[in-house]
Image (spheres, rainbow, N blue to C red):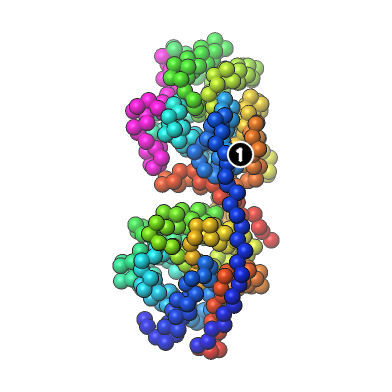
Amino acid sequence: MKNSITEGLKERIEKSSSYSSVGIVLPSNNYNDLTNAIFEYIQEKKSNPWIYVTITKPFHILKNQYKDIIDNNSIYFIDCVSQAAGIKSQDPCCFFLDSPSQLEKLILEIVSIVKEKRDLGEPYVVLDSLSSLILYNDDLLVTEFFTHLINNLVLEHAHSISLCLEEEMNNAMNKMLYLKNDKIIKVKESFI
Amino acid sequence: MDTHECEMVKVSGGNNSNFSQDKNICKTGINVLDEKLGGGIPIGNSVLIVGSSGSGKTTLCMEFLTNGALNNERGVFFTITEPLFKLTKNMEKFKFYNKKLIENGTVNIIDLRIISDRLGLDAEKYSVEDASALLDVLKDIADELQVKRLVIDSITALCYRLKSDEMIRDFIFKLGSSLAAMGCTTILTSEIQPVRHGEIKYSKYGIEEFIADGIIFLSDVERKGDLIRTMQLVKMRGTNHSRSKVAMNISTDRGIEITPLLKSSR
């Protein structure tokens, strides 16, 4: 799982961890490197509660991939794709959203878990990935969703790390990402 | 690998959710709803909760009563749409449901059909006298229990048993006067067909909304084949309430939840 790209990305995330909201734009080729880096970082920062919102891969795939980390850390998942894909799953550490179009319900779930976990430390919310929501929703709606979510997370003193795949981004999303996040990490393929 | 970083300055908004405690206000106990209501429902008001089947009317009413009971406000729930055992069985799934409150009489659930039977009324169709007798019993129970919160679920099913439109109008006006005299905060539920082609009707008989001091309209919006529950405060006399349509969620863990409805679309 560990390689120089993963290590480099993890270092970048670590350096940005004090920011309230961090956006990471990356080419899809490096998606696995980034998720590896995030889970490595979660492993290191295990004293904080983590909420991992998966819109790209079903929860059971992540669980198989990062079993040791998930089993030994305080991570709660929100899976937005399994139910919509007809994959029946149940897990005590995962909430399965009916559909990635239920954006209001997604905000309510995230904020509610943040409130529930914040006594354990400053919660971190990972959105994997924000750009994938465009596959299921109007891009303006995703922009509005992200605005509401970030405002709520700031109020709750929670951190957010939002992944965006370059190939799925458009101008409106790009603007929104820069406007709403405190820090942007942009991974350039040409340098990898 | 190289990364390019851009640092931004964050401008965050404030929280204006402070509402003063008012002894003339009956808080629903559902935080965001109370904020949208401008603090809560004015004590003594009758509120019509309108929605189609499955819109969350009964859950909202039961949470209203439970939250009141936790604040030592006794409540009564008159059910006519579903039998008592079915109602309690459905409610047991919710974390807010507290059996002890029922056992100690802070929340009372009464099946109006059983009362109707005991009064020897025709279960299918009520005469003017039957309706009047039922109304008297309902009033007596509320008085005897000294309830602060009262729910009738539903006024539509109650009126369905009346023989003519004239009787229904007469009954609803009598009910309105009785409720106003009782002084407790009342919720009446009204069943309607799902909204089609934007045509909104707040009640089956077109008159229920006129006896109500407030109307809470529960509906859905469709998004990419998903139904998103919505709530809108259409009217609430005596409050500075919001009229924005909000998204509503029913969670077995957290009960009724409200959040702004996302409205952007191309």
Residue B212: percent from left, percent from top: 62, 27
In the foreground, A153 or B190: A153
- Residue at 54% in and 44% down: B32
Residue A95 visible, this angle: no
- Specify whether residue B91 is painted magenta: yes
Chain letter for mark 1, please: B
Residue B227: percent from left, percent from top: 55, 50
In the foreground, B54 or B258: B258
Residue B141: percent from left, percent from top: 45, 17
Q: Quadrant of the C terminus of chain B?
A: bottom right
Say which amino acid is labelled 1. Answer: Gly
Horizontal side of A47 relative to A174 (left or right) equals left
In the foreground, A108 or B89: A108
- Residue at 55% in and 62% down: A150
Residue B180 visible, this angle: yes
Q: Which residues are magenta?
A: B90-118
- Residue at 47% in and 14% down: B140
Horizontal side of B255 relative to B217 (left or right) equals left
Which residue is label 1 attached to?
B38
Q: Look at the picture and state if B189 lies above or below A60.
A: above
Residue B74: percent from left, percent from top: 44, 26
